Amino acid sequence: MSSTSTPPPTLPDYVLNPDAVLSDPSTTWRHGQPPDYTKTRQFYLQTKKSTHPATSLPALVENLVKNWEIEASYKPLLPEWRTIASPQSYTFRANGSPPQTAAQMLSVGTYNALIEPNEFYCPARSSFDASHKTFKRVMPSFAWEVLEVYAGPPRVVFRWRHWGVMKGDYVGTNDKGEKVTIKAHGGDIDIEGVAVADVNDKLQLGSVEVFFDPMAMFRQMAPDGETGVTKEAGTTE
């Protein structure tokens, strides 16, 4: 499939529309109703670096991943995920870590699946909901885009960008159990990485592996290294 090819009429909606799964009928949503991505999508349109033709491979990959993120973050029942090939065989890996199953990701959340314990944050000390609240408070709109696609299906290799504006203070618990506070500076947080995704003939994800520098986000939050650290053990929000 070339980056400018016209898709056949059988392509699934989750690669044609970034918000396709938000309209799924009879879905069980984590918070009782579909999430609202309106502000994030507006921020994306205003600040994205790349513009892909609607039927190009980069656009299809971008839509697939955005719908996958919605499902991973807001659909608590694995059988209702439409973007993965099989809840039993799907795996996710970050930076060469051991593969995680769909059930494991559903248990810990996408942030905790991506970030290793460090001096700013510890996934083991933050629940699914607490992790989302932590980073949503820092960046109310955290947009994502595909920059380039290097190889097409069945193994898709692409470079991506994830960015936002630090509008709120960061408050988290680090790998030592200390509470870490970083004051909001109103500047950009902008990270990039590469991903390798195996997909089936329906363009559903069978496995995903991402490579990026997770510390880049925290370095941009505290560019001068100034943080507030409370030595007492922090608590999960």
Image: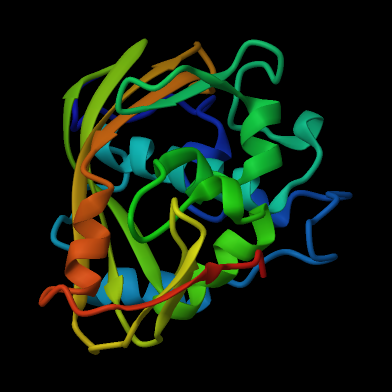
The residue nearer to you, when weighing 113 against 28, is 113
Question: Percent position (x, y) of residue 82?
Answer: 66, 32
Left or right for 190, reference 210: left
The correct choice, above or below, for 39 with respect to 8 in the image is: below
Question: Percent position (x, y) of residue 122?
Answer: 48, 51
Q: Residue at x 25, y 38 (%)?
A: 58
Whether residue 104 appears in this view of the structure is yes
Question: Percent position (x, y) of residue 27?
Answer: 83, 49
Left or right for 176, reference 127: left
Q: Residue at x 66, y 64 (%)?
A: 236
Q: Residue at x 67, y 61 (%)?
A: 129
* Quadrant of the rendering where the N terminus is positioned: top left
Q: How many marks?
A: 0
Whether residue 153 appears in this view of the structure is no
Left or right for 180, reference 87: left
The residue nearer to you, when weighing 102 against 129, is 129
The residue nearer to you, when weighing 225 against 31, is 225
Q: Quadrant of residue 225?
A: bottom left
